[in-house]
Image: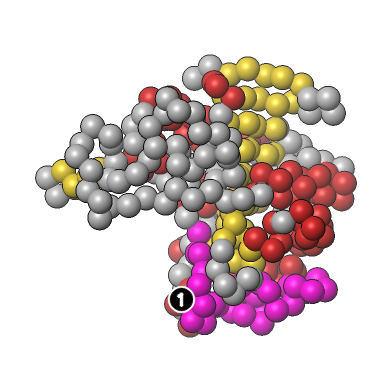
Amino acid sequence: MMMMQERSAGGTDIILSENDYIEYRPGTLNVILTVPHGGQLKPKHLPNRDFGSLVDGDLVFDHEYPKDPTVTVRTMGDKFTKELATALANVLERKTGHRPHLIINHLHRVKVDCNCDRGEATFEVPEVVDAWLAYHNFIELAKKDIGKPGLYFDIHGHSHSEDWVELGYLVSGKKLNAGNYKASETSISGLHEKLLNQGHHVSIQQLVSGPCSFGGLLSAIDSYSDLVVPSPKHLGPDIGQYFSGGYNVWRHGSLNGGDIDGIQIESPITRRMPMEREKYAEAVGCAIVEFLQLYYL
């Protein structure tokens, strides 16, 4: 995988994958922000992701096989998530004096889905595979550079009518509603284990939806008290729509070990739009800084 390194006008190093599809801005804070679905590039020579195939009873995503129209993939992008992540990075730098690691996929989701495993993400198109590998390698590079406990946030956008901020820890809405889940099932299991080893007997439910959870801290900010799931007021989505977290927080959070805990942030379009974006980024940034001070500094 070929890479080139440039320097922006502001003096920030930018590392680009081949064809400039994936952008990595290294940071100095123990926080990683990623944007898997915010890209707009649709190179015509790259085939669109469309339908998978059933081959000998197995689900396969590869353009070489006959398409099965019943096996669909998601191709809708997340509008304004690149801009939101950039605004959030600026807030964190202003508040801490350190910049988070920022990784952005510039290809549209119809060409690659960086929040899926390789097959479904790329349909095994070599140029797309290279971009997908670069995206995840940059995250691993950021984690290695941090070298201590930290936070990984996968930045998404949703169009659910509930209009709330959905925080994904790999726990289903049904389990959140019932409070019936274990730390080992979550993308912040590393934090829970670390606290137990330090003699703090805190439950995973407290870390996911309690007053000192990330959702609790965000919902404590004016105008967000009724808009965050999970949080003290909304332990789960009840019967509402909710994204519990996907491939990225599964792979790069602490579910399978490591010191980096993962949270998927699904923001409604109302918060991603230009008129609300800066205010929203400020609130999320404040909550991240508080969460860092509680558990990671």
Residue at the outermost left position: 56
Label 1: element kind: helix
Classify 183 as above or below 131.
below
Classify 80 as above or below 228.
above
Whether residue 249 can be seen here = yes
Viewer-proximal residue, 230 or 119?
119
The residue at 75%/73% (across/down) is 224
The boundaries of the magenta stretch are: 219-245
Q: Is residue 154 magenta?
A: no
Q: Main secondary structure of the magenta part?
A: loop
Q: Is residue 48 left or right of residue 245?
A: left
Q: Is residue 225 magenta?
A: yes
Residue 59 screen position, x and y as percent: 23, 48
The residue at 70%/26% (across/down) is 14
Residue 287 screen position, x and y as percent: 76, 62
Q: Is residue 296 left or right of residue 41?
A: right
The residue at 82%/41% (across/down) is 98
Viewer-proximal residue, 206 or 220?
220
Viewer-proximal residue, 104 or 268?
268
Q: To which residue does mark 1 refer?
A: 175
Classify 260 as above or below 194.
above
The residue at 63%/17% (across/down) is 4
Amino acid residing under circle 1? Lys
Label 1 Cα crowd, 10 Å radius (few <14 / some 14-19 / many 20+): some
Viewer-proximal residue, 165 or 76?
76
Whether residue 195 can be seen here = no
Residue 232 placement: quadrant: bottom right
Q: Is residue 265 left or right of residue 296?
A: left
